[in-house]
Amino acid sequence: MTTVEQLGATVTETRTITLAGAQQGITAALRKAEELGARVAIVVLDAGGHVQALARMDGAPAVATSVAQNKASTALVVRTPTNEFAEAIKQDAVLVSSLASQPGMALFSGGLPLVSDGTPVGSIGVSGGMGDEDLNVAQAGAAAIV
């Protein structure tokens, strides 16, 4: 039987957000959404892009859940807040069109990578708010996690 030590450089450990951490983020994000009067969906993904926790507030549109997941997925993949990424690529219409047509991509505000000690450990996405509400709610959730 091969041990991890024998595999050496072919194996790496991955740090990821815990359920407890994801729930802390959801709780803080819900609190911020309530404060803003927003009705949103919040999705927290682990480092592998899998849903670790989610919540959809009463009154939030049903589609907000999938949009929030897409925002979280995009932030995880590009390792950048979705609003910053969208701003950085907006001048390249071909790139914007190509990325926007990819399943799971969201090129608008509300998705944030979660980074701990320089390592991506997951992401958070929020959808359903107006203007900067999604970003503000996501920031509150992220601050409670990392």
Image: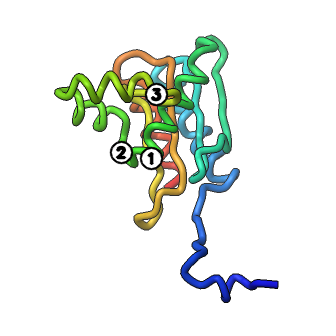
Distance in Å between CA atoms under marks 3 and 1? 19 Å
Position of residue 110 in the picture relative to residue 121 (left or right): left
Distance in Å between CA atoms under marks 2 and 3? 17 Å
Position of residue 117 in the picture relative to residue 95 (left or right): right
Point 58% across, 64% down: residue: 15
The secondary element bearing badge 3 is classed as loop
Point 51% across, 45% down: residue: 123
Q: Earlier in the sequence, mark 2 or mark 1?
A: 2
For disc 2, the marked residue is: 80
Give, as a three-letter code, the residue at label 1: Pro
Q: Nearer the viewer, mark 2 or mark 3?
A: 3
How many numbered marks does the figure carry?
A: 3
- Rate crowding at label 2 as few (under 14), some (14 to 19) or many (20 or more) other CA atoms within 10 Å: some
Quadrant containing the N terminus is: bottom right
Q: Are marks 2 and 1 in contact (CB under 8 Å)?
A: yes
Q: Earlier in the sequence, mark 2 or mark 3?
A: 2
- Rate crowding at label 3 as few (under 14), some (14 to 19) or many (20 or more) other CA atoms within 10 Å: few
Name above or below for residue 79 compared with residue 94.
below
The secondary element bearing badge 1 is classed as strand
For disc 3, the marked residue is: 102
For disc 1, the marked residue is: 113
Query: Which is more toward the observer, 81 or 88?
Result: 88
Q: Measured from the top left, where is residue 125 in percent x and y? A: 51, 34
Give, as a three-letter code, the residue at label 3: Gln
User: In which quadrant of the rendered view does residue 43 lie?
Assistant: top right
The secondary element bearing badge 2 is classed as loop
Q: Which of marks 3 and 1 is in front?
A: 3
Point 46% across, 63% down: residue: 119
Q: Measured from the top left, where is residue 48 in percent x and y? A: 60, 51
Give, as a three-letter code, the residue at label 2: Thr
